[in-house]
Amino acid sequence: MKLVTVLCLFGLLGFLIFGCLPRGAMLGGSRQDPEKILADLESKDSEVRIGALIQIRNQPEVLENPKIIELILGKMAIKDETERGAASMIVDSHKDIIVTRLRPFLESKNFEEYIRATAAIRIIGEPAAVYSDVVGKNLRESLYGIEEGLGPAEVRGQQAVFKIRLASMWAIEAMGKETCQDFGDDVLKVVQAKFEPGQEFNLQVAALRIFAEIGPDAKRYLPHLVDLLNQQETNLSVRSQLMITLGAIGSSEEVDVVPILIERLSANQYKEKLSAIEGLAKMGPSASTALPMLENLMEDRNKGVNGQAAYAYFRISGDAAKAVTHIERELKNPSKEHEMLEIARQMGPDGAPLVDVLIKKLTSEEPFTREYSVLALKGIRVNKPSVIAALTKVAKNDPDQFIREQAVAALQEIQSSK
C-alpha cells in the first residue's frame, strides 16, 4: 500500500503542475533547460533532485535524453521513497514514452540495469508486453541454469540469479493475463521448488501472483497448488498468497476450492485467515456455501476479522447494507481504522452509506487517517454537496501538502464520474 500511496501522491502533484486548477506558486511551472534538469538530477541535495523529477513530469520532451532515462530508472530501485515515488510518477505519467526506451536496459549485461527496467514495467503494465521476449528469456535462463545473459562474470552468482528471477516474474505479472499464460509451466517450477529458509520464498509468492493474474484459465494448475498448500514446510506468506490465488482461479472439476478456503477460516495464523477471506471474496457468488461462516466471523468480536469478513460477505451475497453496518462499527476501532478505510474504498459506490463517517475522519489529527479517508471517498465517488464541501476544505486547508493534492484529485474524480 505504501508504494502505491507514494506513487499516487506524486501523480497528484503532477496533476497540479499541469494546471488543471489555478496554479498559484507551484514547482515546475516554467520550462527549464534540459542540461540544468540533468545537472539537478545528479545534485547532492535531495530537494533539488526531487524538483528536477517534478520538472520532467511537466516537460516530457527531455525524456529524449538517454542519460535522463537512465537516471530515472536508477531511482526506481533506491531506498528513498520520495525520490522513488517521484520517478514512478514520471513513468506512470509518460508510459508511452518510457516504454519505447526500455530495451537497452532490459538487454543490458548489468543485471542491476535489468532490474530497474523491470521496476518500470510494473508501473507501465500491459503495454510493456512487447518485451515479453527478453523478460521471458531472462526468466527461463535463471530457472534452467543457462548463464548467458545473466550479467557479467563479476556479478553473476546466486544472488544475481535470485534477483533476476524475482524481477522477471514481477514484470510478467504486470504484463497481463495473456503474457502470464505463456509462462505458466515455467512459474510452476518455481511453485514446486524446494527452498531453504530465507528470502527465496518470495519467488513462490511471485509465481502464485502470476497464477492469480491468469485467473480461471489456470485451473489445470490447481492440483499442484493444493499439493503446495498441504506441505507442512510451506512458508506462511506462501500459504497466504495461495489462499488468494486459489480464490482468483476458482474451482474446477478436479478441485473444489471453496471448502479448502472455508477450512482455512479457522486457521490459527491471522494472516492466513485474512487471505482465505480475501480468496472467498474473489470467488463471488460461487462461494455462497461460505456465507454462514463469514457471517459468524462478522459477529465474533474475538476473531479480529469482522470488517474483512463483512466485505467478503458483500462480494458473495451482494448484501451491501449488512456489510456496511459491520464496517462502520469497525471504523470506530483505532487499531482497525486504516484497514476499514481501505475496505470502504474497495466497496466503491456500494459504500455510499459510509460517506458521513468518512467526512468526519477528514478532520482527524492522524495524517494517515485523513489520507485514507480521502482515498475512500474518491473510491466511493458519491457526488453530494457535503462530500464536495469537505474535500474542498481539505484541498485548501489540510496541513499536509500531499493530502491537499489527494483531495484535489478526489474532487476531480468525483465530479467527473457519472
Image (cartoon, rainbow, N blue to C red):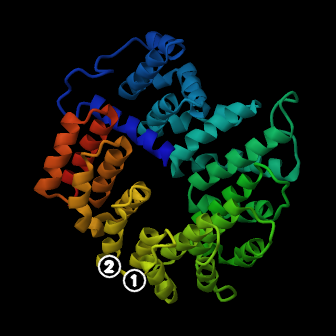
Mark 1: amino acid: Ser
Residue 387, quarter of picture: bottom left
Q: Residue at x 60, y 35 (%)?
A: 102
Mark 2: amino acid: Lys
Residue 129, horizontal then vertical, whole percent? 58, 50
Left or right: residue 250 versus residue 326 is right
User: Closer to us: mark 1 or mark 2?
Assistant: 2
Q: Which residue is mark 1?
A: 317
User: Camera-side residue: 352 or 213?
Assistant: 352
Left or right: residue 3 versus residue 193 is left
Q: Which residue is mark 2?
A: 322
Residue 226, horizontal then vertical, whole percent? 73, 76
Label 1 secondary element: helix
The correct choice, above or below, for 65 with respect to 188 in the image is: above
Q: Which comes sooner in the sequence, label 1 or label 2?
A: 1
Q: Which mark is residue 335?
A: none
